[in-house]
Amino acid sequence: MIRRPPRSTLFPYTTLFRSAKVDAPELARFCVSVVQGGLLLSKIQRRIDPLESAVKHGLAHVRSLRQQ
């Protein structure tokens, strides 16, 4: 069974994803994929740049959803 973090840590995200246009489970999978992909590339290349870039662009995408 997966335990959820305390509600207080989810507050900024739950208010962000209340839009009817955003599918929260799909967005959560996107965020996990961004981090996992960045970590994998960083491990293969033995540099932090791929992870930083993936997170930077992933956050830009999430922020763009908030502005819609």
Image (cartoon, grey):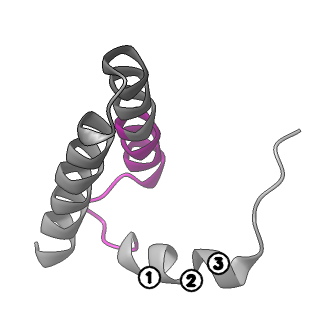
Is residue 36 found left or right of 7 in the rendered image? left
Q: CA distance from mark 1 to mark 3?
A: 12 Å
Q: Which mark is residue 11?
A: 2
Q: Say which amino acid is labelled 3.
A: Thr
- Specify whether 66 is left or right of 22: left
Secondary structure, mark 1, is helix
Q: Amino acid at mark 1?
A: Thr
Residue located beneath label 3 in the image = 9
Q: Position of residue 54 (x, y in %)?
A: 25, 42
Quarter of the image with the N terminus in it: top right
Residue 21 to residue 10: above or below: above
- Residue at 20% in and 45% down: 53
Which sits in the foreground, 54 or 18? 54
Q: For numbered disc 2, what is the local secondary structure?
A: helix
Q: Position of residue 39 (x, y in %)?
A: 43, 31
Figure check: 38 above or below 65:
above
The CA distance from mark 1 to mark 2 is: 6 Å
Q: Which residues are magenta?
A: 18-34
Q: Which residue is mark 1?
A: 15
Q: Nearer the viewer, mark 1 or mark 3?
A: 3
Q: Element under label 3?
A: helix
Residue at left offset 77%, top offset 59%: 4
What x and y, as percent, mark residue 3?
84, 52
Q: Are the two marked residues, 3 and 2, in contact with CB atoms closer than 8 angstroms?
A: yes
Relative side of 33 to 5, left or right: left
In the image, 40 versus 67, the foreground residue is 40
